């Protein structure tokens, strides 16, 4: 793969990370609002829709990374350390998918007082968001290593 291809892939992945961070900011803003003004049982609230949208973004983003994007495991550009990191990052994708589905499955809260509901989801969602930030940072490090490695290989060609 050429350095231009990896540079392009890097740019695509970083753009997707920006879009995901924008969705996360919407969720954090809604969590803050709900903690200040709890939704009451039976009241319509935006959080489930925002989390569903994040889940859908995660799915598209992870699929892109795993099928020819950053985490394309068949890449000849990876060394053994990078391959271990790729495997770890892909495993984290599955964990994020399971966790966000668990959170979504628990959004039926009609029998629980509003403040309790928001507090529970606040902790779960903020943990997910925090873990994703660590994951994203690891992906960015891998992206930088890949681009540097490919550029170094290109410079060594006659």
Image: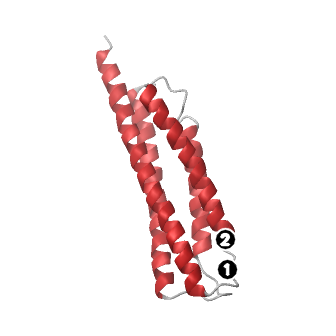
The residue that appears at 49% across and 76% down in the rendered structure is 31
Q: Secondary structure at mark 1?
A: loop
Where does residue 140 sit, x and y in percent of width and height?
39, 44
Q: Which residue is mark 1?
A: 109
Pick the front one: 102 or 62: 102
Pick the front one: 21 or 36: 36
Which label is found at residue 106? Answer: 2
Q: Quadrant of the C terminus?
A: top left
**Dot 2: few (<14), some (14–19), or many (≥20) neighbours within 10 Å?**
few
Where does residue 148 sit, x and y in percent of width and height?
32, 31
The residue that appears at 58% across and 77% down in the rendered structure is 46
Is residue 116 shown above or below 91?
below
Q: Secondary structure at mark 2?
A: loop
Where does residue 143 sit, x and y in percent of width and height?
40, 38
Name the image colouring.
Answer: secondary structure
C-alpha separation, residue under disc 2 versus residue under disc 1? 7 Å
The residue that appears at 56% across and 73% down in the rendered structure is 121
Q: Is residue 88 visible?
A: yes
Q: Are marks 2 and 1 in contact (CB under 8 Å)?
A: yes
Pick the front one: 90 or 6: 90
Q: Is residue 78 visible?
A: no
**Dot 1: few (<14), some (14–19), or many (≥20) neighbours within 10 Å?**
some
Q: Using residue 31 as the reference point, say whether residue 40 is left or right of it.
A: right
The residue that appears at 48% across and 83% down in the rendered structure is 35
Q: Using residue 51 as the reference point, say whether residue 83 is left or right of it.
A: left
Is residue 32 shown above or below 155?
below
Which label is found at residue 11? Answer: none
């Amino acid at each position: 793969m050429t350095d231009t291809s990896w540079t392009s892939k890097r740019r695509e992945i970083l753009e997707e990370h920006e879009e995901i961070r924008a969705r996360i900011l919407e969720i954090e803003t809604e969590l803050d609002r709900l903690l200040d003004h709890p939704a009451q049982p039976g009241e319509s609230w935006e959080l489930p829709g925002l989390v569903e949208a994040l889940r859908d973004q995660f799915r598209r983003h992870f699929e892109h990374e795993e099928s020819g994007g950053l985490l394309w495991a068949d890449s000849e550009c990876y060394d053994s350390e990078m391959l271990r990191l790729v495997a770890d990052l892909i495993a984290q994708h599955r964990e994020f998918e399971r966790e966000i589905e668990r959170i979504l499955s628990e959004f039926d809260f009609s029998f629980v007082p509003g403040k309790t509901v928001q507090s529970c989801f606040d902790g779960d969602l903020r943990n997910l968001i925090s873990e994703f930030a660590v994951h994203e940072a690891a992906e960015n490090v891998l992206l930088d290593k890949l681009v540097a490695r490919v550029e170094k290989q290109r410079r060594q060609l006659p």
